[in-house]
Image: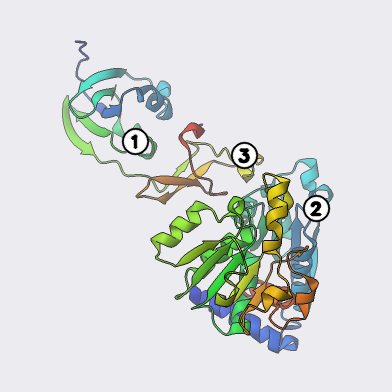
Amino acid sequence: MLNVGKIEEGFVLDHIKAGKSLSIYEHLQLDKLDCTVAIIKNARSGKLGKKDILKVECDINMLDLDVLAFIDHNITVNVIKNGEIVEKKELVLPKQIKNVIKCHNPRCITSIEQELPHIFVLADPNKEIYRCKYCEEKYRESATL
Amino acid sequence: MNPLDFSVEELDKLFDLANDIEKNPSKYAHACDGKILATCFYEPSTRTRLSFESAMTRLGGRVIGFADANSSSAAKGESVSDTIRVISCYADICAMRHPKEGAPMVASEKSGIPVINAGDGGHYHPTQTLTDLLTIRSLKGHLDHFTIGLCGDLKFGRTVHSLINALVRYPGTKFIFISPEELRVPDYITEMLKEKNIPFEEVIRLENVMPQLDLLYMTRVQKERFFNEEDYVRLKDFYILDTAKMELARKDMLVLHPLPRVNEISVEVDEDERAAYFRQAQYGVYVRMALILTLLGLA
């Protein structure tokens, strides 16, 4: 079995759905951070069968938890200090997300007004439905930026 | 602006003002002296634009604007955000129609003046809904405890969807949806009604339900919405209101229509005192007058 060492300070994102870690890497813009990042794919998991894990050595404040919660609020966020877990952060669905997903409704004003941000608003927290702020089109998974 | 942005109490206040304007027009004839309404219509809509212009003129204000995108700076590629910033320097209030959904909302975010949505694509047409509600309230005296039949194109008709969303807030409302299978009301609306425990029926023939109705809201069934010509020919007469069908209705039922009417209501019905669609157009001016006064803080 592959072993990835402990990190001293940063965060570990655990229980990521298998195969989703690269997409999270991109959304969190981890490529722009000058720090150590470990992407672990298809690790064994009692809960999920298979899971992905991301380990990032950086300041926890550099992480946009809203984006993470939108992608999958079941991810466990472990905050690490001095090599130990000091906090487990709970992810809650953000009320609004900006420029994470794109509205693909050709009738929406965002399709012609270039500089407009793509804003989606949480319309139904129980069904986890997001709608475009402008045209109210429902978000579908294929619409990611 | 979505009609649901107003609470039921705020709507009552707006409608009271509209009714006062109806009774005492001279009291309001100079209420907007020195004020300017900009009508920014990126797609043609003669009726709605003239209704806004009539409303502002009757309040003593003046109107500037454009009637289609070709005669505006949009033809040169200017964004809605930039246009409204400039219009804010010229006018005190703006009514905007745009083919793209959400355009008036973008404008309102960038604007220094109130922006009224005068229709954004197939999305909202809030002043039509306000017109419908004011007509019902003025002619019936209340907005609750009605059985309302909505007839015609219930799938694509945005005025129908807005009206349903507005009426569910009043107790005792029952909906009867009368349409061909192809043009049934969308699932998200029937699901919403089930969730709220609001009774509704879906039927195909108008005459079967005429005796039950307090209100009948007619819309046009367009030929191009059908999958084939045969179905259109077979079904189109079900959705034409004529004197024979009116005989089945209650004596105090009201017929409403957002207009323009093509052939879905026979002209012979116009003489029936229950036909309220032209009075509805008049209420459209009153409600826009009330809205302009309210948004300008002059109410």
The verdict on a common chain for dots 1 and 2 is no
Disc 2: which chain?
B
Relative to B167, B51 lies left or right: right
Q: Is residue B15 above or below residue A15?
A: below
Nearer to the camera, B225 or A117: B225
Q: Secondary structure at mark 2?
A: loop
Label 2 – label 3 distance at C-alpha: 23 Å
> For mark 3, what is the residue?
A115
Name the residue: 49% across, 77% down.
B9
> For mark 2, what is the residue?
B68
> For mark 1, what is the residue?
A72
> Mark 1 vs mark 3: which is more N-terminal?
1
Name the residue: 77% across, 63% down.
B263
Q: Residues within 10 Å of mark 1 (few under 14, many from 20)?
A: some
Q: Is residue A135 above or below residue A140?
A: below
Give amino acid for label 3. Glu
Disc 3: which chain?
A
Label 1 – label 3 distance at C-alpha: 28 Å
Give amino acid for label 2. Asp
Label 1 – label 2 distance at C-alpha: 45 Å
In this view of the protein, can residue A71 be seen by the observer? yes
Give the residue at the far right of this rendering.
B71
Q: Nearer the viewer, mark 1 or mark 3?
A: 1
Q: Quadrant of residue B192?
A: bottom left
Q: Secondary structure at mark 3?
A: loop
In the rendered structure, are the residues bearing label 1 and label 2 in contact, judged by CB atoms less than 8 Å apart? no
Q: Residues within 10 Å of mark 2 (few under 14, many from 20)?
A: some
Q: Secondary structure at mark 1?
A: loop
Relative to A107, A68 lies left or right: left
